[in-house]
Amino acid sequence: MKELLLICLGSIFVDNLLLSRYLGLDTLPDEAVNLREVARLGLFTTLIMVIATPIVYLVESLVLAPFEIWFGRPIVILLVIAATVRLASSWIRPFGSFSVINSGLLGLALLTIGRGYGLFESLVYALGSGLGLTAVLLVLAGISDELRFSNIPESFRGVPMIFIVVGILALCLGGFCGMIKL
Amino acid sequence: MHEKAKSLLAIGIVALCSFGVLGSGYLLIHQIADARLEDSGPSPFQMVLPQAISFAPLECGALVVHEAKDVNGEVVGLAFTAVADGFCGPIEVMVALDPHSGRVMKVEIISQTETPGLGDRITAPEFTDQFSGKMVDDFKQIDAISGATVSSQAVAEIVDSSVRQVLAAYRGES
Amino acid sequence: MKKLILGLCPLLVVATTWKIGLLMGLIVLVTTLIATLIFGLIQRYLPPDSRRACHIIIVGTVIGLADLYLTMLFAEQRQQLGIYLPLATVSCLLLSVDALEKGLGKHWSSLIWAFIGGGYYLGLLGVVGGVREIFGRQTPLASSAPGGFLSFGLLLGVIAAVSRRVCGERTIAYLSRLDLRR
């Protein structure tokens, strides 16, 4: 039980999907959106992660691993995610800007397999990662909002600034490293 | 319903084709890789013991150790791999050991999933070179990578414990 | 456009030396070209609902082949890329989808756009790799993890600034409006 909690907390602070692993930044849509949209997107992504990751684990252990088809992973994972998104969209109001082509989802599934997490561990890891990602995206959106009125050189507006802000956030998070031993 | 069936059929066919391509790719590349190995015959352990030409596996307790011999048939070292519990997952380590002096000759990190930019710097020579020439009790003085204490210590500990194990078993046998 | 650059984000992790950056960029470029070629040819024969899934399968297959090729023949480089090689599926998928849209259904157009996109990624990854390698010798931390974000952001900003000087404001505005003409 304690390990599960540690994995969950660890994935939010220490091993953050976006800040440590650079994954999940393409959850952000093209046009600028307000905080509420970002929050909903993030939580939707978390939901997909939580549902899809255990399924991926099952597929991996039952199908991919016994036959050692490691190279088929991205295909299988993406298809599982696509199916999950389809399913989830029928329950919850579908998002226009959400796409299956999301590095966060694929990356999370790959990380879970790479770490050798079991069923419950992958669930918890997915939950923590999704929440951590949502948190960072919210912070990012909030800061981008503020920055719109600042004196940034024209060339640096938009995408360059996003990366610089994320970089600074990642630096801040670096202080958490070592806090939790997984 | 008919539309959906068509879609699924299309996906299925494409998936089958992809499977075929990947499968044949796997077999083909496997053959090429095997052929390559047969020609040059490198063993993965050459990473840590480049001067050896043959590696004979021995069982030393729970570990499988490879006895490395050079051109003259002399044992130049023992090579083995061990897995440590790193910060973010398993760290696979390869160690070359001099059985006569009990000193480590070389350590290489084979695989790890540590934090990029921090923990994964255990793969850098600045870290792994510290192990060369050291004996079992010296590993406590290894300089850890700042910000990656857990990763560094995991490597130090596994090298320490595995070297102890191997030396005990090897000297016990011979 | 923003989505495209954000899609590059996960690949930045591995770009700690210019060699690996170029390798990753090369894989992405070749994969995108091949996948766009194949999918472009068969897409009209596929029922519309299945197109996205088939696109995923095709890109995944090419990446799977690349994975096999590297794992068996260039194991050291493959090890350095880690989970980010299968993850490149997403980035290639993004590029491929975008290229096909921009190509407006014409085959050669799509391929050229795929080449442009992939080449852009290749260049950026190589340069980021080089920058991080150079600065990495001075400050070990600044060239990895958070530093990667920062260097990329700064790099993009510098490129934008230089392009503005060289091409002039009107060309930039024209080019950016070009993207939205879909």
Image (tube, rainbow, N blue to C red):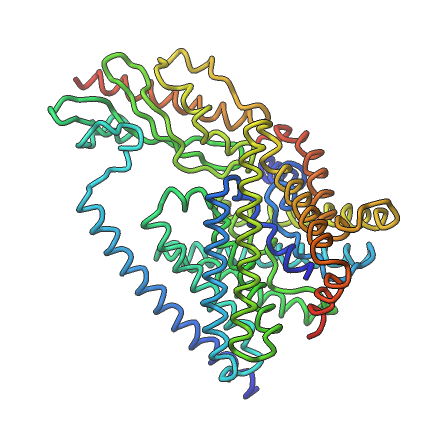
Q: Quadrant of the C terminus of chain C?
A: bottom right
Residue A21 appears in which quarter of the rendering?
Answer: top right
Looking at the image, which residue sits at the far right?
A: A149
The residue that appears at 47% across and 80% down in the rendered structure is: B9
Residue B30 appears in which quarter of the rendering?
Answer: bottom left
The residue that appears at 79% across and 51% down in the rendered structure is: A154
Report the front residue among C27 and C85: C27
Q: Is residue B99 left or right of residue C146?
A: left
- Regarding residue C104, the answer to whether it shows in the image is yes
Query: Above or below — where is C14 with respect to B151?
Result: below
The residue that appears at 25% across and 20% down in the rendered structure is: B169
Query: Above or below — where is A180 with respect to B105?
Result: below
Number of numbered discs overlaid on the protein picture: 0
Q: Is residue B78 left or right of residue C33?
A: left
Report the front residue among A168 and C154: C154
Q: Is residue C35 left or right of residue C156?
A: left
Residue B73 appears in which quarter of the rendering?
Answer: top left
Report the front residue among A21 and A128: A21
Q: Is residue A101 left or right of residue B50?
A: right
Residue B34 position, x and y percent, is 22, 51
Residue B64 position, x and y percent, is 26, 31
